[in-house]
Amino acid sequence: MMKEFTAKNGEKVLLRPVQIEDAEKIIHAVAQIIKSGAYIQKESPRSVEEEQIFIENMIELDNMYMTAIINHEIVGIARVIRGELEMKRHTGLFRTWLVQSAQGKGIGSEIMKYTLKWCRKHNLHKLCLTVFASNGLAHKLYERYGFIQEGVQKEQVKIDGMYDDEIFMAYFLNK
């Protein structure tokens, strides 16, 4: 599944499945996000080899792993990891991030549309995610797309000496 669109600032954006050759660029983008202190549940990027193995595994398991590209640079990713057990195969865990320079341009909305379309195509019933309470922009985006709050883990993370809640949200595709 590929999708091209024009961001709010006029830049051309391509959303497409991740390829093995993307590993190095993904790692570079992850390093930028970690350095900026943005909302990412990662303390260090994978090695190129580790990322390549992860990509191969995602493809093999028929999970979604897509990338957002501007001017041949990876500016974001999204992935859905389906439940491994048969009893949970109808669910997916969603993770996404965008580098700071790509935020506020409508790319997050396009990633959500892409992801929900992928989930429907793969017959998922429920898409789950977590978001930090302090990440109001992402929280509002998820609510706008119909995600509901299922629970809160109080003071679940500590970032720069400050505690933050982790909010569990879900989207039901058959409703």
Image: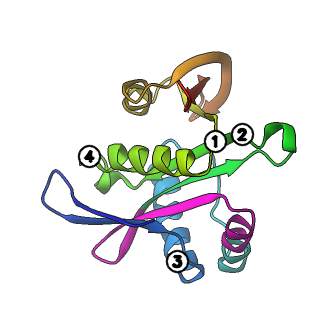
Whether residue 68 appears in magenta in the rendering, the answer is yes
Q: Is residue 102 left or right of residue 111?
A: left
CA separation in Å, label 3 and label 1: 26 Å
Apparent side of residue 162 relative to residue 155 in the rendered image (left or right): left
Mark before the other along the chain sequence, 3 or 1: 3
- Identify the amino acid type marked 1: Leu
- Amino acid type at circle 3 is Asp
Span of residues in magenta: 54-75
Compute the Cα span from label 4 to label 2: 28 Å
**Disc ID at residue 124:** 1
The residues bearing labels 3 and 4 have C-alpha atoms spaced at a distance of 23 Å
Mark nearest the camera among 3 and 2 is 2
Mark found first going from the N terminus, 3 or 4: 3
User: How many neighbours does mark 2 have within 10 angstroms: few (below 14), some (14-19), or many (20 or more)?
Assistant: some
In this view, 10 is above or below 155:
below
Label 2: which secondary element: loop
Q: Locate residue 44 relative to residue 175 in the image: left or right.
A: right
The residue beneath circle 4 is 106
Instruction: Give the residue number, with chain letter if any, for mark 2.
Output: 90
Residue 118, can we see it? Answer: yes
Q: Earlier in the sequence, mark 4 or mark 2?
A: 2
**Outermost residue, left side:** 10
Disc 3 and disc 4 in contact, CB within 8 angstroms: no
Instruction: Identify the residue at horizontal 49%, vertical 75% (top origin).
Output: 25
Residue at 52% in and 52% down: 118
**N-terminal of the two: label 3 or label 2?**
3
Residue 40 screen position, x and y as percent? 55, 46
Where residue 38 appears, as percent x and y from the top left, is 47, 44
**Camera-side mark, 3 or 1:** 1
Q: Is residue 45 magenta?
A: no
Mark drawn on residue 60: none
What is the residue that sits farthest to the bottom in this orientation? 21
